[in-house]
Image: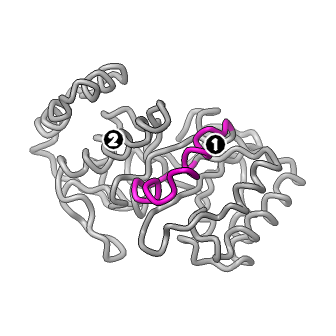
Amino acid sequence: MKSLFIPLFLISYIFANEDYEYIKNSIEMKYKNQTPKQWGENVTGVKSKLNTNEKSIVLTMDACGSKKGMGYDKEIIDFLIKEKIPAVLFINARWIDNNLSTFKSLASNPLFEIANHGFKHKPASVTGKEIYKIKGTENISELVDEIELNSQKIEQITNKRPKYFRSGTAYYDEIAVQIANDLNYEVIGYSILGDAGATFNETQVEKSISKSKSGDIILIHFNHPKSGTKNGLIKAVKKLKKDGYKFVSLSDYSLK
């Protein structure tokens, strides 16, 4: 079956002209008879490493916007700015709504690239599949909304459309990943689970992140300031830098 790749300029044109249903209908037609066979964090098409042997690492940080996840760990951000460490920030629409001035400040800092973490923080499914008692997007139409409504929100505020998508919970079926690709996103997983949804204590965070090697993508959260993430991250980053590792952005390398 031929790819439904939609050029970025055309997507922007369609959204600007309020013809959003055109994209959804086209994608529904392409995938309506396909049934996903995979479900997980590392299904076909999810990128979880940099394509490099250099001592380069990417720090990706999520802000999920759940009822208990509306916080902002300013000390993590202040540390990254002081050390000039770039990070890719995957941000959910609900977190943006509750932290708008902070979001604008982060988006204006060239150290940080804003990425798409979904509109309602749902797992990316075309059948409503569930994980961690969180029901995924029910169908293709809802999946497109989950991706694109948050992207539109980000673009309206920052004047820049995000290039990367990570679903709520980082779970996908492979059809959902293909649809995100058709919409011009690379779907980003991880190779280092840095804080396990901000549940790790400081020692666990430090130990996990300190294991990073060339090309790893680290996943942590910056919306839980009372967690062990901050102190564990700071200690691990200092170790890694001492060992000759540098922190880069996703866009600095191709992904695999």
Left or right of 43 in this view: 199: right
- Over which residues does the magenta segment extend? 89-110
Left or right of 25 in this view: 255: right
Q: Position of residue 77 (x, y in %)?
A: 70, 55
Q: Residue at x 36, y 75 (%)?
A: 132
Residue type indicated by callout 2 = Ala
Q: Position of residue 244 (x, y in %)?
A: 86, 47
* Residue 16 position (above or below residue 171): above
The answer to which image quadrant residue 224 occupies is: bottom right
Depth check: give the residue in front, 185 or 69.
Answer: 69
Depth check: give the residue in front, 180 or 105.
Answer: 105
Rounded to the nearest whole Å, what is the CA distance between mark 1 and mark 2?
A: 22 Å
Looking at the picture, the colour scheme in use is one colour
Q: Position of residue 149 (x, y in %)?
A: 31, 45
Q: Residue at x 38, y 41 (%)?
A: 151
The answer to which image quadrant residue 61 occupies is: bottom right
Residue 137: which numbered mark, if any? Answer: none
Q: Residue at x 61, y 60 (%)?
A: 192
Residue 112: which numbered mark, if any? Answer: 1
The answer to which image quadrant residue 170 occupies is: bottom left
Numbered disc 2: secondary structure = helix
* Residue 158 position (above or below residue 222): above
Identify the image quadrant of the N terminus.
top left
Q: Which residue, as the protein is rendered here, is positioned at the far right?
A: 242
Mark 2 neighbour density, 10 Å: few (under 14) some (14–19) many (20 or more): many
The residue indicated by pointer 2 is 180
Q: Position of residue 158 (x, y in %)?
A: 50, 36
Depth check: give the residue in front, 223 or 100.
Answer: 100
Q: Main secondary structure of the magenta part?
A: helix
